[in-house]
């Protein structure tokens, strides 16, 4: 009987040994996973704090800080390039043009063409100069007419102080048609110019400022015919 009990105790001990080892391994795995999660949480907390600090710094900066920063970095790069070219005895403008690709040059040319040089009326001299430029760009040289007129005028084609050709030139029909078409375009364009509306002293004052006056005019233009009767009843005091 004693031997049987000892054998059963040994069997129980051998069974409990692997189970305890397995449970300890699971516990170690859980603890290791818990430590990893704790480490990741601390890392995430640190990164979030850094992002909050950086965002606060960005919010305190001016609205156009990024553009200013890029501009300053570009100016510094240009200064460094100029110093480098000066040290090598090279022309900076020439080196800069050599570094420009064909695609960049075409893109810049397209941007220049898209820009509108007409900035509005600034003075009669500027307006006349812009019109002169516009008219000269429309000129298409007619070499046949040029040669014909030179043959007709002879030596007076290049007049001197002794030449008497004033009033002898007769414009062609095509030239007169072009002038008429251009004048008609100018008249049509001038008719589209906006002008300041005259102020009516006798009009009812139903606004508190200029913005409110414009809003009332728009409302009257769109809904005036629907609210005319209500407005009249309010003015007479007979509104229900």
Image (spheres, grey):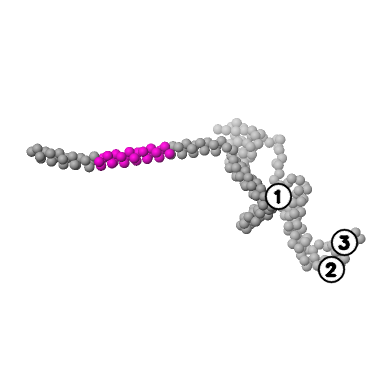
Q: Main secondary structure of the magenta part?
A: helix
- Whether residue 38 appears in this view of the structure is yes
Return the residue at label 1: 118
Q: Which residue is mark 3?
A: 159
Q: CA distance from mark 1 to mark 3?
A: 36 Å
- Earlier residue among tags 1 and 2: 1
Query: Which corner quadrant of the image does residue 230 belong to?
Result: top right
Which one is nearer the viewer's eye here, 168 or 75? 75
Q: Secondary structure at mark 1?
A: loop
Tell me which numbered mark, 2 or 3, is placed earlier along the sequence.
2
The numbered disc on residue 97 is none
Question: Who's the residue at 52% across and 36% down the image?
Answer: 56
- Residue 164 appears in the rendering: no
What is the crowding at mark 1: few (fewer than 14 residues within 10 Å), some, or many (at least 20)? few
65 to 170, vertically: above or below = above
Q: Residue furthest top?
A: 237
Q: Which residues are magenta?
A: 21-43
């Amino acid at each position: 009987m004693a031997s049987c009990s000892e054998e059963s105790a040994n069997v129980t001990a051998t069974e409990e040994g692997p189970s305890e080892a397995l449970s300890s391994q699971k516990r170690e795995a859980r603890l290791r996973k818990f430590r990893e999660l704790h480490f990741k949480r601390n890392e995430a907390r640190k990164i979030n704090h850094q992002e909050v600090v950086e965002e606060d710094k960005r919010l305190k900066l001016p609205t156009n800080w990024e553009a200013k920063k890029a501009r300053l970095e570009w100016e510094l790069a240009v200064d460094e390039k100029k110093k480098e070219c000066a040290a090598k005895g090279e022309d900076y403008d020439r080196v800069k043009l050599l570094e420009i690709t064909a695609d960049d040059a075409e893109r810049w040319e397209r941007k220049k063409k898209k820009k509108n040089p007409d900035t509005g009326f600034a003075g009669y001299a500027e307006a006349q100069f812009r019109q002169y430029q516009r008219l000269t760009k429309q000129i298409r040289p007619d070499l046949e007419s040029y040669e014909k007129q030179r043959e007709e005028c002879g030596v007076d084609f290049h007049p001197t102080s002794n030449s008497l050709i004033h009033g002898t030139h007769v414009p062609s029909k095509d030239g007169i048609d072009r002038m008429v078409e251009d004048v008609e375009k100018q008249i049509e364009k001038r008719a589209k110019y906006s002008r300041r509306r005259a102020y009516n002293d006798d009009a009812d004052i139903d606004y508190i400022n200029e913005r409110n006056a414009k809003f009332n005019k728009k409302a009257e233009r769109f809904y005036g015919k629907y609210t005319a009767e209500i407005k009249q009843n309010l003015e007479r005091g007979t509104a229900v």
